[in-house]
Amino acid sequence: MSVFRSGDQGSEVLDVQQRLAALGYALAPGELAGWFGPSTEAAIRAFQDLRHLRVDGLVGPDTWMQLVEAGFRLGDRTLYLHAPPFRGDDVRELQRKLNALGFDAGKQDGVHGQRTDLAVREFQRNVGEEPDGMVGLHTIATIQRMRPLEDVPSRAVVREVEELRGMRGSIAGKVIVIDPGDGPADGPAEVRVAMAASVAQELAGLGAKPEILRGHTDAPSDRARAANELGASLCVSVHLGGGVPEASGPTCSYRRGRLQRLTVGMLRETRMPAVQVEPLVTTNELEASLIDDEGFPPRVARAVAGGARRFFG
């Protein structure tokens, strides 16, 4: 999809503004005709900060997807296993409640997949309902009557911790997916591709089996699905940071809150541990000059590969 930013105009910008207004964000009256002005950018930044997205004021694939998902509340629609899967805050709320009641709905990622469907059916069997996997108003009311506790650790979190403990050992033989991103918000393509190739070379030298994602669309969910199908032990996304010019320095992000929390698609929808590495900020003039150095991708690669080796060790 296109990336929308300050100064853009049109029906797509108006759609974004209407979704922001429905979520309670105040926009200047003069912008509500589809002009991406200062109040729209401020609202986008506030939304991104709340949702743990990259705060850059741009509406790219991840921000757009979460704007759509934020508009759903549990009970707004009937949920069931579907292709493509239902996504939204209503699904995330369903997963949270099922996990709190002891039914393993998996990661609370807002994606209604196989594990969530199995948890719904198991819940329905336990309360004497037809286990058809259909989450309508009756099933929702039954869940609410059970009064699921708030903020309790889910089985999915416990299972993830145990899986991480079981991964310790040598990096040799581990399949590691490298995601170079695919879109202007991720930085210049030639630099990202060079970094990914260098990371793959370093990982191969350590005995790992690197796989670079190629030929996929810029939709984060498509790249995450490709990573899952490879059965990787680790996913590393190598991007270049953007945002405000005064920002600087490398950033590493992981969805569960270690390092910097980030809920972009590649971290949210991959089934293996995943990290996004941004070695510099392209909007910082001093740091942007580093990408012209031929030695930049290899230096990034050595650092990333060293981190991966220590992770497994």
Image: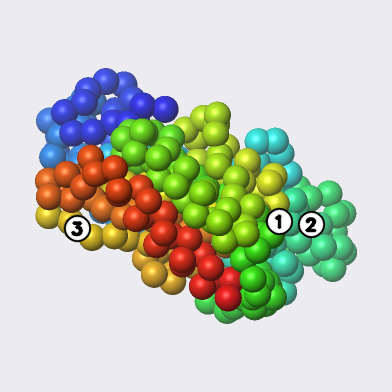
Mark toward the viewer: 3 or 1: 3
Which residue position holds label 2? 118
* Residue in the image at 47% along x and 33% along y: 218
* Residue in the image at 85% along x and 54% along y: 131
Q: Which mark is residue 248?
A: 3
Which residue position holds label 1? 116
Q: CA distance from mark 2 to mark 3?
A: 45 Å
Mark 3 element type: loop
Q: Which mark is residue 97?
A: none
Q: Are marks 1 and 2 in contact (CB under 8 Å)?
A: yes
Position of residue 127 relative to residue 225, above or below, is below
Mark 1 element type: helix
* Residue in the image at 46% along x and 66% along y: 306
Query: Could one spot residue 204 in this view of the protein?
Result: yes
Give the mark, 3 or 1, whose residue is nearer the N terminus.
Answer: 1
Among the 4 quarters of the image, the one containing residue 272: bottom right
Q: Residues within 10 Å of mark 1 (few under 14, many from 20)?
A: many
What percent of the width, then of the height, locates residue 195?
40, 45
Position of residue 313 relative to residue 107, above or below, is below
What residue type is disc 3 on? Ser
